[in-house]
Image (spheres, rainbow, N blue to C red):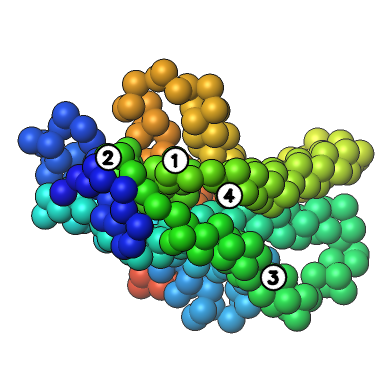
């Protein structure tokens, strides 16, 4: 039900799904279901592998497990409304549920950005200061960094998410996606939302964008160090330890930047473009990250093979 009057308390929003394609929404959900299946099962498998393999109980793989947790949380955050829309044709969502969903989506997005930053520092120390790695990157420090990663996003988001409850909403309360995002809900408010807009922009700049700058800086130092190695074989071997993380960075930040550009400069672009970029941003990284690490990280590959029951691992063929 789409509300068109001014609503002050617990409004119900209408999630669009894919406008004009309602007749085939069940079929549209099939690729999304497959992405959910790969993301949830893949990240759960990564967590189980790291949990059950003592040789993987190192700072690097603890950070990988934190990345898998954030990807799992991001996938689960969008699952209820996607299932409601595409399987049960239910497009309504009460404000309280919408508030919780947007808080979870943005929190896990900020967490993932922070995890990738910490992982880039881990790779920087491993390549640029290998003799000091074990003294700098300790389990205790990784746990403290993980706690900061977990708390940073939710704590920073609390003010703008709570303020949404005090705003009156008017006009057709229609959201263009299959899930709730702060930047969409705020446009439906009937009052001045300057604080939320400026706070949200500052939050993105000083968290996600700053993370990206620091990651790029880390890789600048890594490339400088790798370029100074004696032989090309050593250079390739050193940089190969970063390929999984670099792929994860690209998979997360490229769709995010694309979505930001579309929201900023593509106001007249077809709605399908906005829907496509938002879905890529939220669904592709959780799906691809476990695949990337399973393929590119030899220790994870071997652990998965052992876990699945294949005892004989030909180290030459895998690596």
Disc on the earlier residue, 1 or 3: 3
Q: CA distance from mark 1 to mark 3?
A: 31 Å
Q: CA distance from mark 2 to mark 4?
A: 21 Å
The 10 Å Cα crowd at callout 2, few under 14, some 14 to 19, many 20 or more, is some
Q: CA distance from mark 1 to mark 4?
A: 10 Å
Q: Is mark 2 in CB contact (under 8 Å) with mark 4?
A: no
Disc on the earlier residue, 1 or 4: 1
The percent coordinates of residue 116 (x first, y second) are 65, 54
The percent coordinates of residue 48 (x first, y second) are 45, 75
The residue tagged 2 is 172
Disc on the earlier residue, 2 or 4: 2
* Residue 270 placement, left or right of 19: right
* Residue 48 placement, left or right of 153: left
Depth check, front residue: 49 or 257: 257
The answer to whether 79 is drawn above or below residue 226 in the figure is below
Q: CA distance from mark 3 to mark 2?
A: 39 Å
The residue tagged 1 is 187
The residue tagged 4 is 196
Which residue appears at 20% of the width and 45% of the height? 2
The answer to whether 41 is drawn above or below residue 213 in the figure is below
Describe the element under mark 1 as helix, strand or loop: helix
Depth check, front residue: 34 or 242: 34
Asked if one can make out residue 305 in the rendered structure from this viewpoint, the answer is no
The residue tagged 3 is 148
The 10 Å Cα crowd at callout 4, few under 14, some 14 to 19, many 20 or more, is some
* Residue 181 placement, left or right of 27: right
Extreme residue toward the top, this view: 268
Describe the element under mark 3 as helix, strand or loop: helix
């Amino acid at each position: 039900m789409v509300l068109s009057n001014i609503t002050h308390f617990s409004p119900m929003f209408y999630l669009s799904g894919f406008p004009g394609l309602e007749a085939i929404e069940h079929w549209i959900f099939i690729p999304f279901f497959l992405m959910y299946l790969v993301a949830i099962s893949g990240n759960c498998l990564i967590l189980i592998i790291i949990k059950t393999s003592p040789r993987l109980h190192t700072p690097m793989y603890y950070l990988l497990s934190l990345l898998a947790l954030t990807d799992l949380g991001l996938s689960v955050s969008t699952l209820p409304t996607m299932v409601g829309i595409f399987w049960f044709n239910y497009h309504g969502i009460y404000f309280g549920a919408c508030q919780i969903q947007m808080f979870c989506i943005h929190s896990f997005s900020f967490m993932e950005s922070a995890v990738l930053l910490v992982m880039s520092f881990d790779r920087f120390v491993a390549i640029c200061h290998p003799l000091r790695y074990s003294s700098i990157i300790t389990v205790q420090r990784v746990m403290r960094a993980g706690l900061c990663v977990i708390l940073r996003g939710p704590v920073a988001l609390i003010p703008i998410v709570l303020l949404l409850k005090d705003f009156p909403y008017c006009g057709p309360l229609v959201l263009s996606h299959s899930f709730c995002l702060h930047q969409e809900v705020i446009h439906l408010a009937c009052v001045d939302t300057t604080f939320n807009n400026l706070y949200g922009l500052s939050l993105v700049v000083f968290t996600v964008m700053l993370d990206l700058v620091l990651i790029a800086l880390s890789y600048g130092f890594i490339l400088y160090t790798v370029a100074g190695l004696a032989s090309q074989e050593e250079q390739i071997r050193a940089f190969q330890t970063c390929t999984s993380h670099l792929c994860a960075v690209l998979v997360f930040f490229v769709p995010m930047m694309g979505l930001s550009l579309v929201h900023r400069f593509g106001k007249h672009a077809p709605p399908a473009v906005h829907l496509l970029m938002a879905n890529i941003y939220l669904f592709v990284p959780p799906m691809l990250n476990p695949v990337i690490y399973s393929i590119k990280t030899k220790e994870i590959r071997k652990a998965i093979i052992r876990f699945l029951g294949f005892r004989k691992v030909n180290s030459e063929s895998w690596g």
